[in-house]
Every structure is written in C-alpha cells, then in structure tokens.
C-alpha cells in the first residue's frame, strides 16, 4: 500500500505526515539509491545522503518540494557494467516520494483483541473493530448459542469465507510473482488456508495457467509493438532515400528549365518544349511535397509506437499493483469474516462486523485524534473512515433486558 507523489489524490494531498509513517524517497532509474525511513517522534526523517529533514505536520507534496530543493544540483556517481564512471546530476523530476506504511490505529475498550492494527485507506471504525476481534462484552462472554440451525448456518458461512480467502490468497501469490517477474515464488501452503490439499492444488494450478497465459500475451504484445516500430523505422529510411532522390530530380528539372528559358529567349527552342519542362518541374515539386508529408507521418508513427512500447511496462505494472491492492483487501476481509464466524460459533463475543447478525450488543465508539500538539475527541460513526494514528475507544452497552435477567 503506497501513495506516490505525482499521481496524488485529493485526500492524500491533505494528509499530514506524522511519527510512525514510513516513507520512501526514490530516484528515477536508480533503485539502489532508494531510501526508506520512519518518521521519528520529533517529526524528523533520516534520509541518509540528504540528511535529517523535518517532515512532521507537512503534506507529501510540501516535503517533496523541500527535498527537491535540497537535492537540486546533487551529483550521483554510478558505474556501468564496463566499469566506466557516470556522473548523474539530479533534477526536480528525478525525485519521487511515497508513503509505504501509515502509522497504526490503536483500538481499545470493549474488543476481543485490543492493540495496534495496520491502517489502510477507507478503514472504517466497524472494520477496525472487526480486525480487533469484534466487540466483546464481559457480561455476555459466557452466553452460548445453542440453536442448531444458526450453528449450521454459521458453519456454512465459515466454509464459504474460508474458500474465498484461499482463492484471494492464491491470486495474491500470482500477482506478487508477476510483479517480481519470478514465477518460482513459493505458493501458499496448507498452513495458511482452511481448504483441503486438493482444492488448494486446483486453485494454484488455475493461477499458474493464468500466469503462463499472461506471460505469453505480454510477450506477444511487446513483439507486436517492436515489429511495428521496426517497420515504421524501415519506412522512414525508404522515404528518406526517396526524398533525397526527389530533391536531386527537382534540382535537375529546375536546371533544365533555366537552360531552356535561355534557349527560348535566343529563339533556339520551341515554347512547347518549355511548357513540357515546366510541367515536369511542377510534378517533381509535388512529388517532393508528398514525400515530405509521408515522412512526417511516419516519424509521428515511430514516436507513437516508441511511447506506447515505453509505457507498456509501466501500465502493466500499475495494473498489477492496483490488482494486488484489491486482492489484499479481499484477503483481509475474508480472514476477518472467518474470525467473526468462528467467534459466533464459539459464543465468546458479539459482532458489529458486516455479517448482518442480530446481536444484543449496543456499540458506540469514541475517536481521539492528534491535532497540532494535542489530542481532540472526534465524533465518528461506525461506518466512517479513520485516519492514521487515530485511537479508537469501543464501548459496549448492555441491553436493559439482559441486565434485568442477570439480576
């Protein structure tokens, strides 16, 4: 999960960096020079070759602007494979900054597993509670569900969520292998899923076939673009030769026209012959103009094909990364569903997840959010999004009927 400056969204543009956020500073084309660091408690970030920079309370764009000013004119030394020293002077467009991990959310109060959870965009209070094991009431902890129909329903839903989790996990493996360009990465094992070995083997085999087809299609696409580019360049070479010949021919026609004009003025040639050579000169000039136009069109086609070939890998990688983000979210969601169904089967807690159970729990939340130098209380509903660094306090109110029965 990263937010990359250069294609920054409105929400990310307003996000203020704080302690616990992990950032990566990259130099285009120089992966070995990437620097990853976590913002420290004083709001500073140690970027090694650029030194320590104050980033707390600033947006990514503001920090990137400062870093570009600091790095402007810096020279990076790189050695080629032949051992030659290359000096690369940095420009503003060479630097990129991204958040690779946000500071965590803290969930406390009436939940099964209080503590820190990883923040992800669009994380709601409801999902955060689910990741913390669900809302838990001490008074209701020992209440067991004995309805056999409900238990069977939960068992079926647990199995369904388990299968969806295995499918998403195997898809995530395939996308990771395609991103790394390494089809030999070890696939998920039985210790990571709840399905049996036959089901897991079939899922892995399906994703291997998809991976193979994708590689074949990508190779075909690249070959097609490369061949089209070679053909366009060959056409340019032919047109350039034809243009050179046309220029020579036009020059010869113009010279002949000049010579005949002199003869005509001396009465040594006929006007009809002069008219013929003028038509020939006009045709030669028209032919040259046509060739110039065709050459310009061919050069534009080469530029387009080259750009398409250069962007192909970038577009492919962007699609894979976006796909991995979506699938990773599915892995988390299905895992949470499994946990929640397991909790309902055990009868150990109530749930306010997205599963639609009618529970006896009345859940309210309180959010503490750091603003400037202090924490403030923010009103938030269960389905509203949290921000990195938020503290979510969960409260479970017992229904009056339960308290009456308990007494």
Image (cartoon, rainbow, N blue to C red):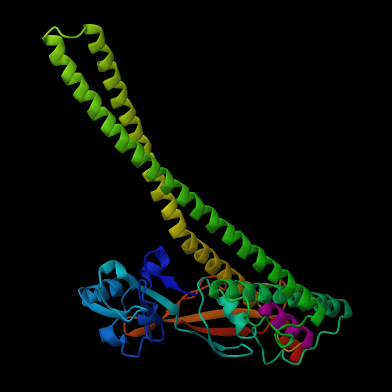
Reply above or below: 110 against 5. Answer: below
Residue 348 percent across, percent down from the top left? 73, 89
Question: Foreground: 339 or 289?
Answer: 289
Check the image and name the residue furthest to the front: 268
Q: Can you see residue 63?
A: yes
Question: Foreground: 27 or 287?
Answer: 287
Residue 325 in magenta stretch: no
Q: Can you see residue 358?
A: no
Q: At x 18% / y 16%, what residue is drawn? A: 260
Numbered label tally: 0
Question: Foreground: 243 or 76?
Answer: 243
Q: At x 54% / y 63%, what residue is drawn? A: 319
Q: At x 62% / y 75%, what residue is drawn? A: 183
Residue 225 percent across, percent down from the top left? 50, 53
Asked whether, in this view, residue 126 is left or right of residue 36, the answer is right
Check the image and name the residue furthest to the right: 148
Q: At x 42% / y 54%, what residue is drawn? A: 306
Residue 34 percent across, percent down from the top left? 37, 80
Residue 384 percent across, percent down from the top left? 53, 70
Asked whether, in this view, residue 384 is left or right of residue 370, the answer is right
Picture quadrant of residue 67? bottom left
Quadrant containing the C terminus in the rendered view? bottom right
Picture quadrant of residue 163? bottom right
Q: Which residues are magenta?
A: 334-346
Q: Of helix, strand and loop, which mostly describes the magenta segment?
A: helix
Residue 336 in magenta stretch: yes
Check the image and name the residue furthest to the left: 266
């Amino acid at each position: 999960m990263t937010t990359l400056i250069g294609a920054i969204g409105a929400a990310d543009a307003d996000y203020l960096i704080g302690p616990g956020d992990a950032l990566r500073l990259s130099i285009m084309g120089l992966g070995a020079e990437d620097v990853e660091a976590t913002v420290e408690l004083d709001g500073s970030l140690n970027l090694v070759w650029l030194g320590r920079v104050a980033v707390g309370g600033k947006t990514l764009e503001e920090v990137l602007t400062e870093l570009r000013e600091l790095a402007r004119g810096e020279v990076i030394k790189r050695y080629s494979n032949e051992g030659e020293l290359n000096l690369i002077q940095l420009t503003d467009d060479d630097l990129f900054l991204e958040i690779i991990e946000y500071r965590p959310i803290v969930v406390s109060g009436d939940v099964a597993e209080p503590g820190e959870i990883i923040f992800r965009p669009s994380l709601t209070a409801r999902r955060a509670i689910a990741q913390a094991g669900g809302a838990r009431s001490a008074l209701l902890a020992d209440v067991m569900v004995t309805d056999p129909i409900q238990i069977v329903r939960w068992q079926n839903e647990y199995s369904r969520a388990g299968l969806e989790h295995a499918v998403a996990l195997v898809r995530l493996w395939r996308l990771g292998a395609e991103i790394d360009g390494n089809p030999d990465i070890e696939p998920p094992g039985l210790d990571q899923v709840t399905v049996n070995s036959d089901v897991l083997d079939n899922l892995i085999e399906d994703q291997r076939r998809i991976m193979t087809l994708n590689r074949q299609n990508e190779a075909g696409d690249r070959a097609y673009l490369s061949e089209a580019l070679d053909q366009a360049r060959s056409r340019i070479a032919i047109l350039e030769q034809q243009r050179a010949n046309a220029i020579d021919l036009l020059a010869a026609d113009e010279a002949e026209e000049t010579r005949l004009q002199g003869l005509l003025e001396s009465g040594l040639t006929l006007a009809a012959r002069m008219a013929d050579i003028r038509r020939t000169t006009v045709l030669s000039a028209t032919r040259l103009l046509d060739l110039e136009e065709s050459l310009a069109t061919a050069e534009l086609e080469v530029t387009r094909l080259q750009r398409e070939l250069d962007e192909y890998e970038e577009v492919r990688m962007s699609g894979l990364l976006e796909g991995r983000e979506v699938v990773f979210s599915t892995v988390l969601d299905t895992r949470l569903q499994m946990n929640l169904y397991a909790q309902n089967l055990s009868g150990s807690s109530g749930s306010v997840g997205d599963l639609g159970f009618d529970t006896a729990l009345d859940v309210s939340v309180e959010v503490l959010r750091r603003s400037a130098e202090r924490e403030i209380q923010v009103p938030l509903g269960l389905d509203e999004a949290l921000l990195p660094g938020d503290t979510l306090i969960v409260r479970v109110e017992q229904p009056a009927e339960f308290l009456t029965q308990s007494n």
